[in-house]
Image (cartoon, rainbow, N blue to C red):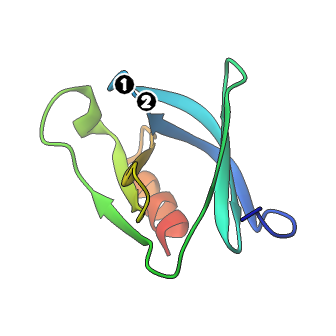
Amino acid sequence: QPLLGVPIREGSLWHLSAQDRFEPVHFSLYVNGFAFCTSDGLEASVSLSPFSLVRNCRFQSGECSKLKSFKVSLLDPDPCCYFAIRSSCEREADEERSDWVL
């Protein structure tokens, strides 16, 4: 199903790639899904079902543990997408993550 209308929110996030590293992306949120593009021009769009779930998450160790992360759980063959906020101020990162998740 195509994404509907214009984005209701856009911004810069970090995406956990297939190579298990976070990379910067431009993220666009729509009423029925989201799209993002990487700095090297790769684009992806995802339509969400009513059963999709968005939740805060935390990585326990390594560089990823310094990011404020959230995951989008889907009912597709690729069940999860991970995104994160990077900020020097932990409170600001928490607030921005909450804005995306809620």
Residue extending furthest toward the left? 60
Task: Write the residue at 36% across / 50% down.
Answer: 69
Disc 2 residue type (three-letter): Ser
Task: Write the residue at 38% across / 56% down.
Answer: 70
Residue 85 rendering spot, x and y as whole percentages = 46, 45
**Cα distance between the residues tagged 1 and 2:** 6 Å
Residue located beneath label 2 in the image: 17
Residue extending furthest toward the bottom? 50
Residue 30 rendering spot, x and y as whole percentages = 72, 66
The answer to whether 76 appears left or right of 68 in the picture is right
User: Relative to the observer, which residue lies in front, 46 or 22?
Assistant: 46
Task: Write the residue at 41% across / 65% down.
Answer: 75
Task: Write the residue at 39% across / 28% down.
Answer: 18
Query: Which quarter of the picture shows residue 32?
Result: bottom right
Residue 74, placed above or below residue 49: above
Q: Residues within 10 Å of mark 2 (few under 14, many from 20)?
A: some
Tag 1 near tag 2, CB within 8 Å: yes
Q: Residues within 10 Å of mark 1 (few under 14, many from 20)?
A: few
Residue 58, placed above or below residue 75: above
Query: Which quarter of the picture shows residue 56?
Result: bottom left
Which quadrant: the N terminus?
Answer: bottom right
Residue extending furthest toward the top? 40
User: Relative to the observer, which residue lies in front, 86 or 90?
Assistant: 86
Residue 63, placed above or below residue 68: above
Residue 57 rendering spot, x and y as whole percentages = 27, 57
SS category of the residue bearing label 2: loop
Residue 2 rendering spot, x and y as whole percentages = 77, 62
Disc 1 residue type (three-letter): Arg
Tell me the number on the disc at residue 21: 1
SS category of the residue bearing label 1: loop
